[in-house]
Amino acid sequence: MLDGKVAIITGSSSGIGLSIAQEFLKNGAFVTICGTNEEKLKKALDKIGTQDNQKRILKIRADVTKTSDVETLFKETKNMFGKIDILINNAGIAPSKPMEDMTDEDFEKVININTIGTFKCTREAIKYMKENGGSIINTSSFVGLYGSPNQAAYTASKYAVNGLTKSNAKELGKYNIRVNAIAPGVVMTDMVKDNCNEETIKRLNMMTPLGRGAEPSDLVGAYIYLASDASKFTTGAIINIDGGLVM
């Protein structure tokens, strides 16, 4: 479904982003994986790079909060693969802390990565997609529709991502750039395991009609759909992939 398409996937050294990269490669795409941790990026490349697809993968260390890193990310991808068709804004953090204990720095760090990072990458993508169109897919969250205690910063960041998704979909449609978001529920990534205790995860699983949290691989079909021509008339959508948690 993605033969010949070129995708940049931020936050793809592990978790959801790595699963997306792996499936995009299986579906014929050229993929740039990026993150801030060089060691994790190397491990990711070792995991998904095979003899058949290694020429279709580019690894770049990039911090999405830094404009110069974002510019380099896009420039090097274009130089390597000749174009950019797809941007997955997936880089994010989800710390959990009571509102009264949250410092300015705690709040600002989440907003900088989750929201401003999405803004900077989207702004840069326009330069490369303006002529031939493209698909931008933002990773949101069920908390961006529902809210969550002890996650004021994360919730605020994902409400903002939803706002960016809808605003940019309306603004960029004239260039045939589609902008959509995936809103996962509880996904069993290392980030979730590190920030949610077993009791919280158990409670959320009980609230989910399908009775469990998702594995990263459960989400990738929606990303493939939004990245492919099968969704060529879909824009401004926020698609819940949450086992029925929010409906």
Image (cartoon, rainbow, N blue to C red):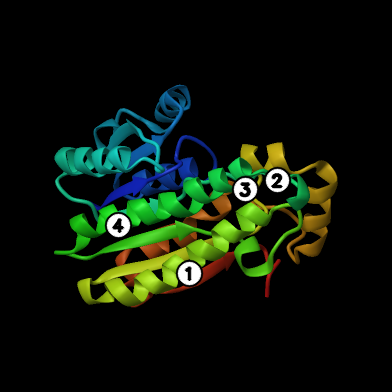
**Image quarter of residue 65:** top left
Considering depth in this image, is 150 or 193 the residue closer to the camera? 150
Q: Horizontal placement of 55 versus 218: left or right?
A: left
- Between disc 2 and disc 1, the foreground one is 2
Mark 4 touching mark 2, by CB under 8 A?
no
- Give the percent coordinates (x, y) of residue 210: 73, 63
- Give the percent coordinates (x, y) of residue 13: 46, 35
| Residue under label 1 | 163
**Image quarter of residue 223:** bottom left
**Numbered disc 3: secondary structure:** loop
Between the C-alphas of marks 3 and 2, the distance is: 29 Å
Residue under the image location 60 percent in, 60 percent down: 156
Task: Please indicate, yes or no, whether residue 101 appears anywhere in the rendered image.
Answer: yes
Circle number at residue 123: 4
Residue under the image location 25 percent in, 53 percent down: 5
Q: Of the residues shown, which amino acid type is indicated by label 1?
A: Gly
| Residue under label 3 | 215
Query: Does label 4 or label 1 sit earlier along the sequence?
Result: 4
- Give the percent coordinates (x, y) of residue 162: 50, 67
- Give the percent coordinates (x, y) of residue 137: 41, 60
| Residue under label 2 | 102
Q: Of the residues shown, which amino acid type is indicated by label 4?
A: Arg
Query: Does label 4 or label 2 sit earlier along the sequence?
Result: 2
Between the C-alphas of marks 3 and 4, the distance is: 30 Å
Mark 3 touching mark 4, by CB under 8 A?
no
Q: Residues within 10 Å of mark 1 (few under 14, many from 20)?
A: some
